[in-house]
Every structure is written in C-alpha cells, then in structure tokens.
Amino acid sequence: MILDDCGVEYFFSLYGGEAISMPFDNHPSITPKLASIGKPVVVEVAVPGNALRACHPMSTTILSRYHQTVREDAHLFEAEAMWRTPVAPEHVLSVTPLDSFLAQGLGAAGR
C-alpha cells in the first residue's frame, strides 16, 4: 500500500480501519473514540496473486508503479483487491508500527 495516496491517512486514523469505522463515519461521539484506540500498524503478507479478487488486473497496477520509477510523470493505475480467507501466520512477513514504517521511507511511492 502506498501511504502518500490521498484518503489513506483517514484509513489509518481510526481503530479497525474501514471494517469498523464505516458504520460510524463522522459520528460525533464514536469517531473520536475510534481515533483514540491503539496505534496503527502496516501488516505485510505473502498471498498467492491468483487468489486475490480484483476489479482490474493487478499486473496493470504493478507495472504502473514500476513505470513511475522509470518516468516520474507516469500515470499511476490503482486497483483494490480482496482476500477472503484467513492469512496463515507463516505468511505474515512483517508487522510494523505506522510511524516506524513512515520513518524508514517505506510508505513512499516507488518503494
């Protein structure tokens, strides 16, 4: 996930991300509570690409990210993908606090 894309900051600002925050989006008393729970982390997992369900081919997204490393003005193509099965513990590659992830420069485009 590229963390400098617009909209992602909000995702990391609330406990539980989208799954918990969507029903309470902008609720005057619940949203601040969700923002005060815990600290966000970035979880990197290894999952088979053919098991992801995406609206667009993920290869287009990957190639466009590479293209940006070669040509700064390249258009980025993005797609969301869903993974509907549990991730086995051995497929979790890393769990990094968001502030450490950003301090290492890992959230920047072209990583």
Image (cartoon, rainbow, N blue to C red):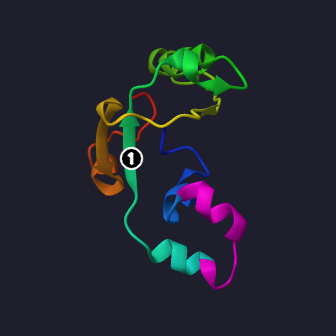
Quadrant in the rendering for residue 25: bottom right
List x then y, in percent, for residue 83: 57, 33
Q: Residue 77: in sight, yes or no?
A: no
Magenta region, main secondary structure = helix
Residue of label 1: 42
The residue depicted at 37 percent of the width and 53 percent of the height is 41
List x then y, in percent, for residue 58: 60, 19
Q: Is residue 24 left or right of residue 36?
A: right
Q: Nearer the viewer, residue 70 or 30?
A: 30
The residue depicted at 46 percent of the width and 15 percent of the height is 70
Q: Residue furthest bottom?
A: 29
List x then y, in percent, for residue 68: 51, 21
Q: Name the amino acid, label 1.
A: Val
Q: Is 21 covered by the magenta stretch?
A: yes
List x then y, in percent, for residue 67: 52, 15
Q: Residue 20: in sight, yes or no?
A: yes
Q: Nearer the viewer, residue 108 or 42?
A: 42
Q: Is residue 99 above or below residue 36?
A: above
Q: Is residue 27 above or below residue 74?
A: below
Q: Is 69 covered by the magenta stretch?
A: no
Q: Is residue 104 left or right of residue 11?
A: left
Quadrant in the rendering for residue 50: top right
Q: Which residues are magenta?
A: 17-30
Q: Is residue 76 above or below residue 63?
A: below
Indicate the quadrant containing the C terminus: top left, top right, bottom left or bottom right: top left
